[in-house]
Each structure stands twice: as C-alpha cells, then as structure tokens.
Image (cartoon, grey):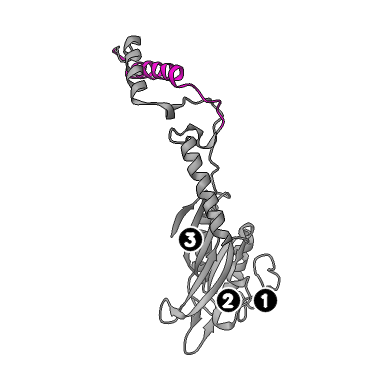
Amino acid sequence: MTIKLVIGGCTLSVISAYAPQVGLDEEAKKRFYEDLDEVVRGIPNTEKIVIGGDFNGHIGATASGFDDVHGGFGFGERNGGGTSLLDFAKAFELVIANSCFPKKENHLVTFRSPVAKTQIDYFLLRRGDRGLFKDCKVIPSENLTTQHKLLVLDLKIKRDRRKKMISDRPRIKWGGLTPALSREMGEELMGMGAWSGSGDADIMWNKAASCIREVASKMLGVSRGKFGGHKGDWWWNGEVLGKVEAKKAAYTKLAEC
C-alpha cells in the first residue's frame, strides 16, 4: 500500500510492505521484491520515500559489507532474508533507518516471543535524505500485536517559507478616500459613461475598471510604489504619532523603576 503526503513543498511517498514468512518458497520471496521494485521505480526521484514494514529478515548487528545502507547498529545475526533486504536497499540507494542509531536492546528488538527475540521490522529512506530522520527506535511498552513492538521514526521536514512579495508598482492612495470624494468620483464616472454599455461582460468590466482607476488616480493621487509603513493609512496622523511616542516614553520610565 502506498500513500502520498504533501508537507509544505515536499511530497512524501509512504509504502507499507510485508515480506513472505520464513519457510515459504523462494519464488514467493522473489515475487515480493519484484513487486516492491516496481512500486519504488514508479516514484519520481524528486519525491521522498519512506518504506516501512515486516521484512521477515535479520540484517545483523554490523554492516559487514553493506556500509552504504546499514548504519552499523542492528541486532542479532544476519540471515538470507536480511541479505535480500540489504541488496534491495543497495539497488535503490536506500538506507535502513533503525540501523543508524545506537540503541539498547529493548529499542532494537521489534519482535518478541517466549522463545525468540528478533529484529524484522524496518524503515527505509533514500540515502540522500539521511538528514531528515532524527531518530528511530522501538517503544518496548507498546505492542502492535501480541508479539510485534511499535517502531517509531522521527522525521523533520522543513516547510518552505514563502517570502511576501512587495510590489514596486505605483499604487492608488485608496486610504485617502472620503465620503465626499466618493460622491465626487461617482458623478465623474457617470459623466464618463463608466457604467453604460452592453454586450460582452469582459469588455464592460474592463471599461469600468479603467475609468475607476483613471478618476481615482487623479483625485487621490498615486504612491511611488515603495512601502511606506503607516503612511498609506488614513488614521496615521500627527495626533496618533504623538500618542505612540508618549506610550513609548511611559514604558521606558516604567522599566527604569
């Protein structure tokens, strides 16, 4: 199963996998990895990948020839299922997240029964996204089933902060519009025939908008295009400025007490 998450400007494909159990024929295991290969190949390189699941294999406590995909902090002895997983990760330049952090045994063992304790559940991510995951460990006190333990992966994805665009275009000083000017503008627009016309709606709209901009520019004036703080606000005047300065002075005096 695959789901896509869009976080900020990042697209994350999350894949859930379940490998054939130990004891099944090699053909079933081969089909599993062929199907998983097809899913991963269908994901664009620009997208992040998180593969999580029960792979029914032991990758072993050390990297031993798989340093590029095994972080060196595994559990137990490697078996055939673990080697298949490591080969798959190497082919797609993935890294096994829960082998990248030194942990106590309780935080490595994902499967525990009265007769065995093993590590068979894993998270895999692109090697180039190694900086995204900050931790990966088992929560011993939480069970998903009777024998499987909860494996948690901590990811940190930065959201793109879009910078506010500040336009340098000259703008009409709409802040200076008063009821009296509104009536005067309305009379002039009526004389220009801004509201008259028929036919295409776009043509009528463009004509009205053009007339409004022309009259408003003449009556209200046009700014130079630079952001001028409070200057465009009708309420920002000398009286308000004086009160703001008095407030600052009072606060400074209070802080000195």
Dot 1: element: loop
**Of the numbered discs in the image, which one, if any, rests on residue 58?**
2
Q: Residue at x 38, y 15 (%)?
A: 207
* Percent position of residue 145, x then y: 41, 78
Q: Position of residue 244 (x, y in %)?
A: 50, 45
- Residue 114, above or below 102: below
| Image disc number at residue 62 | 1
Task: Tell me which residue sits at (55%, 42%) in the image.
Answer: 163
Q: Could you say whether the residue bearing mark 3 is in a helix, strand or loop?
A: strand
Indicate whether residue 206 is drawn in magenta. Answer: yes
Foreground pick, 153 / 8: 8
- In the shown orientation, is residue 2 left or right of residue 137? left
**Please, what is the dominant secondary structure of the magenta stretch?**
helix
Q: Residue at x 46, y 54 (%)?
A: 4
| Cα distance between the residues tagged 1 and 3 | 26 Å
Q: What kind of element bears circle 2?
A: loop
Three-letter residue code for mark 1: Thr
- As displayed, is residue 155 above or below residue 139? above
Q: Earlier in the sequence, mark 1 or mark 3?
A: 3
Picture quadrant of residue 185? top left
User: Is residue 110 something one can see in this rendering?
Assistant: yes
Distance Cα–Cα, label 3 vs label 2? 20 Å
Q: Which image quadrant for residue 220? A: top left
Marks 2 and 1 sit apart, C-alpha to C-alpha, by: 11 Å
Residue under label 3, please give it. Answer: 15
Q: Amino acid at mark 2?
A: His
Q: Are marks 3 and 2 in contact (CB under 8 Å)?
A: no
